[in-house]
């Protein structure tokens, strides 16, 4: 008799109807979005504060470069001594005073630039001022030496090295970043999924043991069926939760940004602002275009198929181990000693993924780890966007499936014996003995 | 085919530990079969073998003349000693689930459950969660779940633990009724009074071996010592005792009686019948109590386990 669908249904429904599951499903994205919204709001609050900066340019060289922006007002002071200027700025509670003193030469002027303020000024602001001044003074110095600025600007060459493999596949630096993000995201998703829902499976096995229903159940169902039903049912509940998170998160994000007028996509940390300033010289349009084309260039079909295969294979592999652990122990506190050997390869996989795949996606280390079944799902998923030969992918999947079948067999053995054992905390030696019962 | 279940020299080892050593039992159709034995004797292992939870290392089990197969799960109802239900699941849903696992259709299961719930007057528990019920209440549900698919063979492992006397009686009557309706019952327990009340066949397992089995009546006959409890009315107790002692093996007896009699246990001599003893006694004194001492299941249990 095949009871698998029945068991899957029960496992799924009990998980999905569970109060804490429902609360977690709904609350998690709300909390996440709320957090993001608060951070975004705060940083916007910070950015949108209008600052007034007084400029006292005694050299008269750079006045022209200070143009008011949305958040910053520049007040040009004339014919005041620096002491008066300082007093004035302090009284008016302005943000600060930029003083450019007189000098014989441009170099003299450069040495005499100072910023006065009540508190330490923000890094972004200072960097902004510095780059403005640098550009102006560079131009001035070039002019002093008789260089035609217009000519110089027009003769600037901009280089972006086109990359192409011997087979004619084109790629670029942006491509690599996109690939890394795709691979990293896939690998990280799998990692999270295994940890969250693997634990859920383990707990549900332990629950069956502690409520002592297990013997009633396995007098009508084969333990392997029960175990697989549990794994599949819980995974489906997990996928449901994930999908709800994504949809709810997306909707909430839109609602929140509509209500508060916060554009979250543009939420920026100061570091990002710096980066943007650094990139300002390059064409933004070109960037977006090449971004789109590099996403387009990804081996998408391959990626999706392999993502599904490795995700399912890797997840089932780990979750059967989790189920075996749940069967071997009586309560959750006893699981610690068995958790480590499971978590180690998983964490190792993520580290290998992050450190070696970025450096050299087809190097020995990443290649080897993308074949070892406990690490291959994460590492291979990270490698695939960089183009992995099909034979490697197929071999790795086959190894994974083979190992998965072995682990299910192994876990089922432990499960079968373990679920009927009460009272003692088993050692590894005992687990080994169980395999032979 | 008179036996519903036959186990042929079933053995099971767990590593070096032998849980069952060539155990054979025969459970006649329509009987209540007591599976007895001290703790850790191997009863539960044998029951698990019958339920196909554990596979035997050697030996075979036949149900209704066929070697045990997975479809036989339908024909067996098992109430394990370690029992429980999903705590956070509703009573009705849970019972339906377990019924479906036994191979019943949903509508069939609903009908049967309705019958049992009404019989036990627990219909209003349908939407309660198990964790809201008391232990005794949960045990009732567990009983219903065990019998609802009308199995040919019912296996109860310590069915009365956790029940108060009233409910224990209720369950006992249900078991008897199920037997009368044609079910065969295997009944594992240490509680000898319930064995006495219910079982017609027993098997005694001790340290992985079966050391005794058969009809309870036959076993009792085998174990009887031909001793009779006798109450005599006499004015001279010492004299009378000595008189009897000359002919028979006599010991002091202790039983409840309305009179202040001389109470003795008298063992028959070989080749004597009870009538011979009675004749002898009536010639000496007035007999107002005459009763054959039948060994109790408990006596047999203790004696056999000690001797083995």
Image (spheres, rainbow, N blue to C red):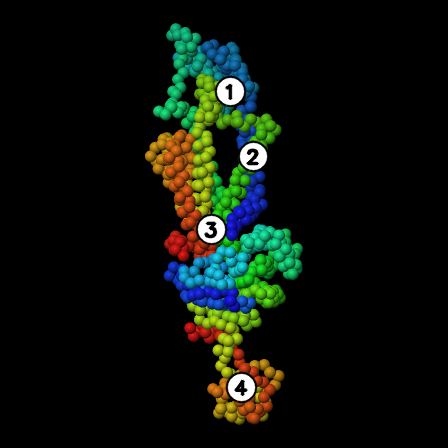
> Residue B12 vs residue A19: left or right?
left
- B246, above or below A192, in the image: below
Q: Pinpoint the chain carrying mark 4.
A: B
Asked if one can make out residue A147 in the rendered structure from this viewpoint, the answer is yes
First-in-chain label (3 vs 2): 3
- For marks 2 and 4, give the CA distance: 90 Å
Label 4 and label 1: CA atoms lie apart by 125 Å
Residue at (52% x, 45% y) in the render: A233
Q: Nearer the viewer, mark 2 or mark 1?
A: 2
Residue bearing mark 4: B274
Which residue is depicted at the point 58% across and 88% down? B287
Q: CA distance from mark 3 to mark 2?
A: 34 Å
Mark linked to residue A96? 1
Q: Does residue B213 sit above or below A46 in this rendering?
A: below
Q: CA distance from mark 2 to mark 1?
A: 46 Å
Could you tell which of marks 3 and 1 lies nearer the N-terminus? 1
Q: Are marks 4 and 1 in contact (CB under 8 Å)?
A: no
Is the residue at mark 4 from the same chain as the one at mark 1?
A: no
Q: What residue is rendered at 58% in x and 85% in y?
A: B289
């Amino acid at each position: 008799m095949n009871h698998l669908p029945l068991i899957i249904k029960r496992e799924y429904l009990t998980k999905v109807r569970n109060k804490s599951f429902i609360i977690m499903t709904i609350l998690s994205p709300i909390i996440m979005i709320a957090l993001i919204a608060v951070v975004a709001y705060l940083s916007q609050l910070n950015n949108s504060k209008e600052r007034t900066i007084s400029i006292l340019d005694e050299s008269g060289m750079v006045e022209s470069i200070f143009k008011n922006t949305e958040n910053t007002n520049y007040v040009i002071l004339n014919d005041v001594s620096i002491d008066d200027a300082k007093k004035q700025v302090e009284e008016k509670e302005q943000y600060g005073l930029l003083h450019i003193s007189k000098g014989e030469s441009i170099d003299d002027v450069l040495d005499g630039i100072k910023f006065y303020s009540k508190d330490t000024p923000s890094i972004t602001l200072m960097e902004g001022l510095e780059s403005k001044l640098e550009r102006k003074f560079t131009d001035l110095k070039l002019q002093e030496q008789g260089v035609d600025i217009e000519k110089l600007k027009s003769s600037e060459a901009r280089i972006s090295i086109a990359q192409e493999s011997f087979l004619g596949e084109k790629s670029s630096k942006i491509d690599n970043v996109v690939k890394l993000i795709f691979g990293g995201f896939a690998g990280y998703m799998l990692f999270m999924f295994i940890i969250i829902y693997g634990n859920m499976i383990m707990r549900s096995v332990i629950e069956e043991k502690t409520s002592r229903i297990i013997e009633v159940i396995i007098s009508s169902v084969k333990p392997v069926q029960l175990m697989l039903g549990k794994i599949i049912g819980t995974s489906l509940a997990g996928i449901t939760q994930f999908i709800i998170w994504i949809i709810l998160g997306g909707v909430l994000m839109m609602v929140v940004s509509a209500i508060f007028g916060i554009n979250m996509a543009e939420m920026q940390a100061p570091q990002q602002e710096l980066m943007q300033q650094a990139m300002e010289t390059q064409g933004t349009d070109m960037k977006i275009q090449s971004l789109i084309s590099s996403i387009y260039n990804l081996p998408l079909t391959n990626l999706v198929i392999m993502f599904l295969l490795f995700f399912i294979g890797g997840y089932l592999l780990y979750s059967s181990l989790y189920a075996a652990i749940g069967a071997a122990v009586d309560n959750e506190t006893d699981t610690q000693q068995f958790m480590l050997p499971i978590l180690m390869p998983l964490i190792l996989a993520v580290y290998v993924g992050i450190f070696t795949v970025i450096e050299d996606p087809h190097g020995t280390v990443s290649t080897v780890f993308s074949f070892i079944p406990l690490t291959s799902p994460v590492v291979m998923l990270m490698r695939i966007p960089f183009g992995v030969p099909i034979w490697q992918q197929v071999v790795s999947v086959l190894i994974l499936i083979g190992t998965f079948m072995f682990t299910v067999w192994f876990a089922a053995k432990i499960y079968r014996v373990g679920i009927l054992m009460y009272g003692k905390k088993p050692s590894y030696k005992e687990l080994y003995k169980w395999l032979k019962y | 085919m008179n036996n519903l279940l036959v186990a042929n020299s079933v053995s099971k080892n767990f590593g070096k530990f032998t849980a069952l050593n060539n155990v054979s039992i025969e459970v006649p159709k329509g009987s209540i079969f007591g599976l007895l034995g001290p703790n850790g004797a191997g009863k539960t292992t044998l029951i698990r073998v019958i339920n196909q939870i554990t596979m035997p290392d050697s030996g075979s089990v036949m149900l209704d003349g066929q070697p045990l197969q997975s479809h036989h799960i339908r024909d067996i109802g098992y109430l394990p000693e370690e029992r429980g239900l999903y705590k956070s699941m509703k009573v009705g849903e849970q019972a339906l689930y377990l019924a479906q696992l036994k191979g019943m259709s949903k509508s069939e299961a609903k009908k049967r459950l309705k019958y049992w719930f009404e019989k036990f007057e627990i219909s209003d528990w349908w939407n309660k969660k198990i964790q809201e019920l008391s232990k005794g209440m949960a045990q009732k549900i567990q009983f219903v779940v065990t019998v609802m698919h009308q199995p040919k063979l019912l296996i109860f492992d310590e069915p009365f633990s956790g029940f108060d006397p009233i409910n224990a009686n209720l369950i006992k009557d249900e078991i008897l009724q199920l037997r009368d309706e044609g079910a065969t019952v295997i009944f594992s327990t240490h509680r000898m009074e319930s064995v006495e009340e219910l079982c017609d066949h027993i098997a005694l397992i001790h340290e992985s071996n079966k050391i005794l089995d058969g009809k309870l009546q036959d076993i009792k006959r085998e174990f009887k010592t031909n001793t009779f409890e006798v109450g005599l009315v006499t004015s001279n107790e010492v004299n009378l005792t000595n008189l009897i002692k000359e002919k028979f093996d006599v010991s002091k007896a202790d039983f409840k009686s309305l009179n202040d009699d001389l109470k003795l246990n008298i063992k028959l001599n070989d080749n004597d019948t009870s009538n011979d003893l009675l004749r002898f006694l009536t010639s000496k004194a007035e007999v107002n109590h005459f009763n054959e001492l039948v060994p109790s299941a408990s006596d047999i249990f203790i004696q056999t386990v000690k001797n083995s």
